[in-house]
Amino acid sequence: MIESLILQQGSGWRAQAEVFDEIFFVFLALGTLVGTIVVAYTLWNVYKYRDDGDEPKEGFDAPEVGELPTGQGGPKAKKLFLSFGLSAIVVISLVVYAYGILLYVEEGPDSDGDNIEITVEGYQYGWDYEYPNGHTETGEMIVPADTRIDIAVTSRDVWHNFGSSELRIKTDAIPGDTNTNWFSVSSEEVQAQGGEATYRVECFELCGPGHSAMKGQITVIPQDEWEAWYEDTGSDDSPSGNESASGNTSASIGGSTAGGVPA
């Protein structure tokens, strides 16, 4: 468990999906263990103190409905307070563990200058993605693996909610407001999906009659392939071609990098 709290070692970031899956597994495993112990102990006491028709042993302190231990050191009081103590340890440990790991989800890994910020704008009924160099994609966000992707989410008309269940991200898209979130996908996951990982994007806020069709896609490709794709995007958005796109990039990021990759 101590190792799981070290969520960032150098550039070895953990994706939100991995973090939430770990939290689910820890709570499921511990809940199953505690539940099994409690049920087993209850059934054992049911069998041990069953009414077999014989007279109770002399001095037997039979439990009564609604009775609480008096705290005078009897065996029932010791068992109750032992149960309270163990329960407190389990609950406090889970709170500390979950709080520490959720802080990472909330704030994300420390930025090392290579993260990419993409503006996500929802509309009835689709998504636009604007990259640091001004290039815009509709319906599909293309990003590199092993990179923190920061998203700034807003809307041009009504309330939407940008989310991907597979990546465990959800962010409100509100007109006139911007909400931020982040995600990352490892190169191992990209290779496991055949060199290109895809994740479905949906709107999780009822936004009109076309809400159910408001879908998109996040495509994750290897870093070198993404850099080659990104270098050619500026020419599509400017009548002056690459020269104008390069000027736009220089104004945005100081002429050296575009979104954390060489321009």
Image: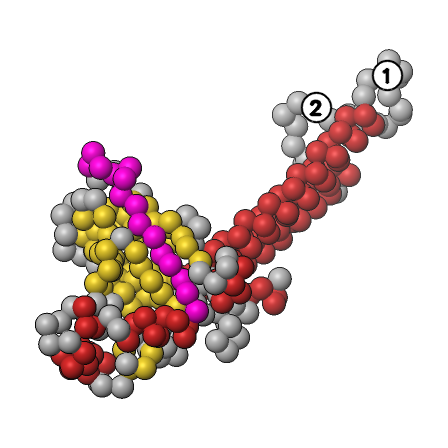
Name the outermost residue toward the top. Answer: 53
The residue that mark 2 highlights is 64
In the image: residue 12, left or right of residue 109: right
Number of residues whose C-alpha sits closer than 10 Å to that of mark 2, classed few (under 14), some (14–19) or many (20 or more): few
Q: Nearer the viewer, residue 25 or 37?
A: 25
The three-letter code of the residue at mark 1 reads: Asp
In the image: residue 104, left or right of residue 94: left
Report the span colored magenta: 208-222
The three-letter code of the residue at mark 2 reads: Glu
Q: Can residue 209 be found in the magenta stretch?
A: yes
Where residue 206 sits in the image (x, y, percent)? 25, 38
Q: Nearer the viewer, residue 221 or 89?
A: 221
Q: Tell me where residue 228 sits by quadrant.
A: bottom left
Q: Tell me where residue 22 sits by quadrant.
A: bottom right
| Residue at (53% x, 75% y) in the render | 9
In the image: residue 81, left or right of residue 174: right
Question: Which element is circle 2 on?
Answer: loop
Q: Earlier in the sequence, mark 1 or mark 2?
A: 1
Question: Which element is circle 1 on?
Answer: loop
The residue that mark 1 highlights is 52
| Residue at (59% x, 51% y) in the render | 26
